[in-house]
Image (cartoon, rainbow, N blue to C red):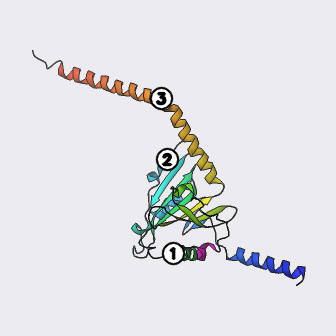
C-alpha cells in the first residue's frame, strides 16, 4: 500500500470521527456559555433563585433543576437532577445525576453506548481508576469514559455510593478559573474569619443594648413600686 493511500485512509478516518462527533458543549437544550436568564427560561425557574456560592474574587452561582417537574413523563426521565454552575454569570459546568432506578441493571458499556450516540466516540483517554471531576467527587467515585474537544469535556462518572451514574460537561477554559476562584474564596473567608467574628459580636452586643433600651423606655413609665 502506498504512503498516499495510508495518509488518505487516516485522514478519512479522522474526518469521519469528526463528522460523527457531537457538540461537547451541549446538554439537551442547554449550552456551555449560556447566561443565567437563558438557563432559567428553559428550566422555567426564576433567575433570582440562583444560589450564590461565592461573591469574590469571582461570582459563582448554581441552579438546581429537576427535569421531571417540568413537562415530560417522569416514567421516561432518567435524570434525577441537574446542577448548573456559573462563573461570573456564564454557564461553565453541567452536572447530571441519573436516577439509580432508571439505570438499574445497566452496565457501564450500556451507558457509554447511549452517551456516544449523542457525543460520538469516546476519544479522550481515561487512566485506570481516574478520579471523577470535583463536581462529582468522592473518595470512591471514578470516571468511566470521556468525550470532548478543545472547548469542552464530557465525563461519564460512577458514584462510589451505590450503583449510580452521572454526566459532567465542563468548559475547559472556565472550569479551572472557577476552581481557582473557589479556592481563593475559601482562603479569604479563613483569613477574614477572626475580624468577622469580632464584628458579629459587636453587632450582637449592639442589638442587645438596643433591645434593653427599648424595654427600659417601655417599662420605666409604667413601673410602680
Q: Check the image and report above or below for 114 versus 97.
A: below
Question: Which residue is under mark 3?
Answer: 194
Q: Nearer the viewer, mark 1 or mark 3?
A: 1
Q: Pick the residue in front: 129 or 8.
A: 129
Extreme residue toward the top, this view = 225
Looking at the picture, how far across and down is residue 83, in whole percent?
Answer: 49, 59
Looking at the picture, how far across and down is residue 122, in whole percent?
Answer: 64, 71
Q: Which quadrant of the rendered structure holds the N terminus?
A: bottom right
Question: Which residue is under mark 2?
Answer: 53
Q: Is residue 58 visible?
A: no
Q: Residue at x 81, y 81 (%)?
A: 9
Label the magenta part by its dominant secondary structure.
helix
Q: Is residue 6 left or right of residue 202?
A: right
Q: Pick the residue in front: 114 or 89.
A: 114
Q: Is residue 115 left or right of residue 173?
A: left
Question: Which residue is under mark 1?
Answer: 107
CB under 8 Å between discs 1 and 3: no
Local packing at callout 3 (Cα closer than 10 Å; few below 14, some 14-19, many 20+) is few
Q: Quadrant of residue 26?
A: bottom right
Amino acid at each position: 500500500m502506498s504512503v498516499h493511500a495510508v495518509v488518505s485512509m487516516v485522514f478519512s478516518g479522522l474526518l469521519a470521527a469528526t463528522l460523527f462527533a457531537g457538540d461537547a458543549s451541549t446538554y439537551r437544550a442547554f449550552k456551555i456559555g449560556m447566561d443565567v436568564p437563558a438557563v432559567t427560561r428553559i428550566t422555567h425557574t426564576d433567575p433570582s433563585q440562583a444560589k450564590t456560592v461565592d461573591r469574590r474574587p469571582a461570582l459563582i452561582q448554581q441552579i438546581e433543576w429537576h427535569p421531571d417537574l417540568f413537562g415530560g413523563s417522569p416514567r421516561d426521565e432518567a435524570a434525577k437532577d441537574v446542577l448548573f454552575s456559573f462563573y461570573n454569570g456564564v454557564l461553565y459546568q453541567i452536572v447530571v445525576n441519573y436516577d439509580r432506578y432508571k439505570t438499574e441493571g445497566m452496565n457501564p458499556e450500556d451507558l457509554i453506548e447511549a452517551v456516544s450516540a449523542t457525543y460520538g466516540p469516546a476519544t479522550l483517554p481515561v487512566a485506570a481508576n481516574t478520579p471523577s471531576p470535583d463536581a462529582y467527587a468522592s473518595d470512591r467515585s471514578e470516571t468511566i469514559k470521556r468525550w470532548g474537544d478543545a472547548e469542552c469535556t464530557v465525563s461519564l462518572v460512577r458514584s462510589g455510593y451505590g450503583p449510580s451514574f452521572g454526566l459532567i460537561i465542563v468548559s475547559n477554559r472556565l472550569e479551572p478559573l472557577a476552581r481557582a476562584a473557589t479556592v481563593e474564596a475559601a482562603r479569604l473567608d479563613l483569613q477574614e474569619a477572626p475580624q468577622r467574628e469580632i464584628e458579629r459580636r459587636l453587632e450582637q452586643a449592639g442589638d442587645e443594648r438596643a433591645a434593653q433600651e427599648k424595654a427600659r423606655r417601655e417599662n420605666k413609665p409604667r413601673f410602680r413600686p
